[in-house]
Image: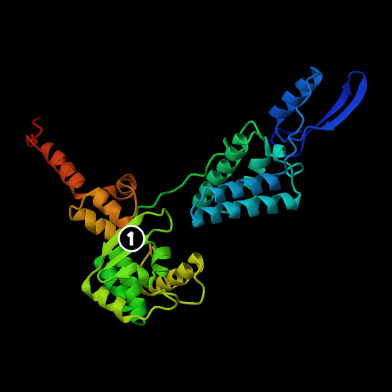
Amino acid sequence: MSKQCRCPLWATGTHEGAPYRKSLKTRSFERAEQLKREIENGKKSQKPKGITIRDALGAFIKDCEGRNLARNTLRKYRSLQTRIIDFVELGRVVGLERLDGWAHDGARDFRASWKLSPLTASKQIGHLRTFFAFCMESGWISTNPAKNIRVPQLKVNPRLPFSEKEIQNILSKAEDDRELCFLLVLRHTGLRIGDASLLRSSQVAGDRVFLYTTKAGNPVSVKVPPNLESLLQAIPPKGGYFFLRGESIHPHTASDLWRKRIKAICKELGIAPAHPHRFRHSLAADLLSRGVSVENVAAVLGNSPAIVSKHYSQWISSRQDALDAALESTWKPALRIVADQK
């Protein structure tokens, strides 16, 4: 049998004068060899703790709820819970009903079943590691089965802002004042589309928008220009919300409707990538290029200064000025071009 085979491995033969045949509950040849030696040496395996994967997931979610994690974070962990349970119920891999059955190859088998983008898969692996770390802290397992799963290679695209011309063209496609107002909110506040799509009338006072961001819970207070202030005052809120396109106030439903609309506008105009987050990048780049400090831009965006420096370093004017000065210093003395004399 090839060592690349992923079939479950069994121990067969004679042990202590009696026929022996038992599943080793692993697909790893290395682990199988280790178990075989333990059997031959008379070492008995530890008795399973008895907790099922379903019970462990339930305890993990309950702990997350008790820690008052952000709603979006809880949604991701519940999604992981559903994925794991659905995978176990398929029954393609034996022994995963119990938590200790994941100890060696279970997590890799689970990873192999995904059909996700590299970025989404990387995040899912992180969530999986967090879950198994909780199980370790609870004393149910001794190692983290997901620790050695390698994340896929990611191609990180630069965070490009819209050009001013692109923004003007997008605004010109607004079908009504509410849509125009929404686009201007994205442009002048830098809010994520999830926060902007559920902007409440109570979060706007005169020329200022104030809220706690959904993703990180950070406070954001942004002054808006007079034209946007006038539009916000003129638009009647729907159930207390300015920009509901349907009846649902679920963050993903509300934001997806706006995301589809903006992508349709960008597709019509030939603007790519057609991602509404580029409005946020535009505000950050505009502020940084005008010499606004990283700390102040972070306060506007509801991020940490470290995140702003990481993602928008090319727009920090002071850094660029220092780099330009350093480059200019290499010009002196000027290089002399000497003709080749033969």
Residue 2 at what x, y percent from top left?
Answer: 73, 33
Q: Does residue 115 appear anywhere in the picture?
A: no
* Occupied quadrant, residue 44: top right
SS at mark 1? helix
Residue 21: x and y in percent read 87, 30
Quarter of the rendering occupied by the N terminus: top right
Position of residue 98 measured from the top left corner of the image (x, y, whole percent): 73, 41
Q: Is residue 43 above or below residue 254?
A: above
Q: Please tell me in which quadrant of the rendered image residue 183 appears.
A: bottom left
**Residue 72 visible in this rendered orientation of the protein:** yes
| 196 to 218, vertically: above or below | below
Residue 33, horizontal then vertical, whole percent = 73, 25
Examine the image and state in which quarter residue 335 appears. top left
Q: How is the image coloured?
A: rainbow
Q: Residue at x 77, y 24 (%)?
A: 36
- The quarter of the image holding the C terminus is top left
Q: Nearer the viewer, residue 172 or 239?
A: 239
Number of numbered labels in the structure image: 1
Q: Residue at x 29, y 78 (%)?
A: 233
User: Where is mark 1, residue-wise?
Assistant: 280
Q: Residue drawn at (7%, 37%), measured in percent from left and top?
A: 334
Q: Left or right? Give the position of 110 relative to 211.
A: right
Q: Is residue 62 left or right of residue 172?
A: right
- Looking at the rendered structure, the kind of residue marked 1 is Arg
User: Which of these two is toward me, 273 or 222?
Assistant: 222
Q: Report crowding for label 1: few under 14, some 14 to 19, many 20 or more residues within 10 A (C-alpha).
A: many
Q: Measuring 92% from the left and 25% from the top, which residue is drawn there?
A: 19
